[in-house]
Amino acid sequence: MDAKALYLETGNRFEQAVESQLFGKPCFKINGKAFICFFQDCMVFKLTGTQHAEALSLDGASLFDPSGKGRPMKEWVQLPVEYADRWPAFAKAALDYVSQTA
């Protein structure tokens, strides 16, 4: 399965999530707020605390910089497809985080 299909499968696990756009990239939102998106064959998660630190510690992970101009979004972690098996858990953490801040 390709990265985009895995992203869609992960996002569609959450019945309350709605497909949308974030900076022109596909995303899923809860209550109008994005919690995951897809960019450069990677899944991007809005995280905080230990989940943020854990995701960012993985090889190939980086802060999400959608503009490519060296202005990363501090709460958003971009994970390559090599970690697709972990995408659902990070997506759930992102959903929980965004739901608390809504």
Image: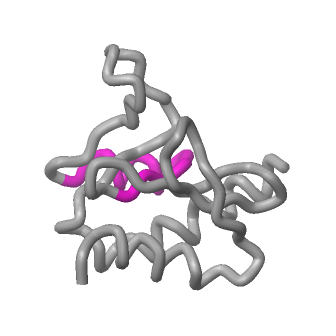
Query: What residue sits 23% from the left and 65% below the top?
Result: 81
The colour scheme used to paint the residues is one colour
Q: Is residue 27 above or below residue 5?
A: above
Whether residue 80 sits left or right of residue 78 in the image: it is left
Q: Position of residue 20 (x, y in %)?
A: 65, 56
Q: Position of residue 2 (x, y in %)?
A: 24, 76
Q: Position of residue 71 (x, y in %)?
A: 41, 17
- Considering depth in this image, is 47 or 14 the residue closer to the camera? 14
Q: Is residue 8 above or below residue 41?
A: below
Query: What residue sits 29% from the left and 39% below the top?
Result: 62
Image quarter (top left, top right, bottom left or bottom right) of the N terminus: bottom left
Query: What residue sits 65% from the left and 51% below the top?
Result: 34
Query: What residue sits 29% from the left and 73% below the top?
Result: 84
**Magenta residue check for 52:** yes
**Magenta residue check for 63:** no
Whether residue 76 sits left or right of residue 93 in the image: it is left
Magenta span? 43-58
Q: How many marks?
A: 0
Furthest toward the front, the residue is: 24
Whether residue 51 sits left or right of residue 22 in the image: it is left
Quarter-wise, where is residue 36 in the image?
bottom right
